[in-house]
Amino acid sequence: MINGDQKHTTWRKSSYSNGQSSCVEVSDHVPGTVPVRDSKHPDGPALAVPVPVWAAFVTAVRAGRLRSG
């Protein structure tokens, strides 16, 4: 997890967020890591996902290999 001041981090909603209550935000400006957080809790913790792991996750989502709910 990422600790510290996240207010100075630039966050964006993931293109895979559904526009309702399931919004994931990511940051693109941490070398080697993709920070991920829940947009409903911006002051809460953020996960620090290694870039290769995040890439594999996005590939699986795009390929439809993951299901929600």
Image (spheres, grey):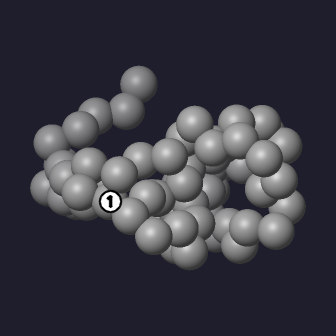
Q: Which quadrant is the N terminus positioned in?
A: top right
Visible residue check, residue 58: no
Q: Secondary structure at mark 1?
A: helix
Quarter of the figure that contains the C terminus: top left
**Is residue 1 placed above or below 54 in the rendered structure?**
above
Question: Does residue 42 appear to the left or right of 66 in the view shown?
Answer: right
Residue identified by numbered label 1: 51
Q: Image point 50% across, 46% down: which residue?
A: 48
The spot of residue 46 in percent (x, y) is 63, 42
Left or right placement of residue 8 versus residue 36 in this view: right
- Report which quarter residue 16 is drawn in: bottom left
Query: Where is 12 relative to 53, above or below?
Result: below
Can residue 49 be seen here? The reply is yes
Tell me residue 34's x, y (percent): 46, 59
Q: Where does residue 41 sit, x and y in percent of width and height?
A: 79, 39
Vertical arrangement, residue 15 with respect to residue 46, above or below: below
Q: Residue at x 78, y 56 (%)?
A: 6
Is 43 or 5 nearer to us in this picture? 5
| Residue 27 picture location, percent across and down | 58, 66
Q: Nearer the viewer, residue 58 or 21?
A: 58
Residue that sits furthest to the top in the current view? 69
Q: Is residue 27 left or right of residue 43?
A: left
Q: Amino acid at mark 1?
A: Val
Frontmost residue, 68 versus 14: 14
